Image (cartoon, grey):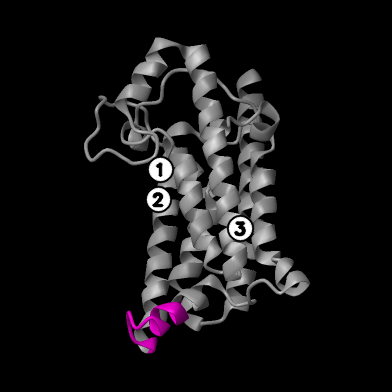
Amino acid sequence: MRASAIEFRLRMAIVTIAVMLGFWSPWIEGWGIGRRISLLEWLASELSRLGLTSSTVATPLVIVFGTLISALGALLRVCGTAYLGSEIAKNAEMKAGTVMADGPYRYVRNPLYLGLWFALAATAFIMPATGALVSLSLLTLFLIRLVLGEEAFLSSKVGEAYRAYLRAVPRFIPRLRPALPSAGRKPRWGQALIYEMYPVCLFFIMAVLSWTYNNRLMQKGVLVAFGLSLIGRVLLRMNVQSSRQEKVL
């Protein structure tokens, strides 16, 4: 059930492929399974069809729900990266260091994976309904595998200090009050906002573009957000490398 080292190394590529599969949904034309309408539209129509709310209220209600999910994803990702550091968040290998007990890590052990799940759940609103189901199911399973793999690795490398952290802080459902004192780590908000450009832009897409009721425009927004995220991460990497060279000199 645990993810392998190669899965961890290729985690973002695997996530990207699963998201692309959700948007593509080849089984709709190939096997006639589902319809090519967005999950947002499908949920709104189902709420109206079941008589849970009127048709005029259904779509705004789903949009607000999707916006809240995207906001939660952006908040968890930005806060998690601000305290952990983008250089660790992007690392291709599992690293064992000191136990992180600051910021959101005092409330939940995996704010980055949890934030990623919420960001992907918000992205699913723009996919075809069946594509959203397949993509989110695959991603949920993969993220659980990543979490289990990291926990096993850190338990073996860090030892009792990490196992005590596991006992004190829940894996996915945040505590209302932290069980551990702050370690005094300073967050790097600017770096985190650049590194987490995708979930931040996704919140804008859900909060603003979804009210145009134009799913094609929202899909284009996702592509732009993904492109900006890649550019931001490249710029951060160049900045880190430049800083290291300056220290050497």
For the residues bearing labels 1 and 2, Cβ distance under 8 angstroms: yes
81 with respect to 230 (left or right):
left
Identify the residue position indicated by label 3 in the image.
134
Check the picture and name the quadrant holding the N terminus: top right
**Between marks 1 and 3, how big is the CA–CA gap?**
28 Å
Which percent across, then down, holds residue 217?
A: 60, 76
Mark closer to the chain start, 3 or 2? 2
Q: Compared with residue 55, is residue 2 higher up or lower down, i.e. above or below?
A: above
Identify the residue position indicated by label 1 in the image.
79
**Between marks 1 and 2, how big is the CA–CA gap?**
6 Å
Q: Residue at x 55, y 30 (%)?
A: 88
Identify the residue position indicated by label 2 in the image.
75
Task: Judge the density around disc 3: few (<14), some (14-19), many (≥20) Cα neighbours within 10 Å.
Answer: some
Range of the magenta residues? 44-55
Q: Residue at x 64, y 33 (%)?
A: 8
| Front-most of residues 111 and 133 | 133
| Front-most of residues 80 and 243 | 80
Closer mark to the observer between disc 3 and disc 2: 3
Task: Judge the density around disc 1: few (<14), some (14-19), many (≥20) Cα neighbours within 10 Å.
Answer: many
Q: Amino acid at mark 3?
A: Val
* Secondary structure at numbered mark 1: helix
For the residues bearing labels 1 and 3, Cβ distance under 8 angstroms: no
Q: Amino acid at mark 1?
A: Cys
Residue that extends furthest to the right in the rendered view of this protein: 30
> Is 243 included in the stretch rendered in magenta?
no
Q: Amino acid at mark 2?
A: Leu
Which percent across, then down, holds residue 29?
A: 75, 74
Which percent across, then down, holds residue 76?
A: 41, 46
Residue that extends furthest to the left in the rendered view of this protein: 177
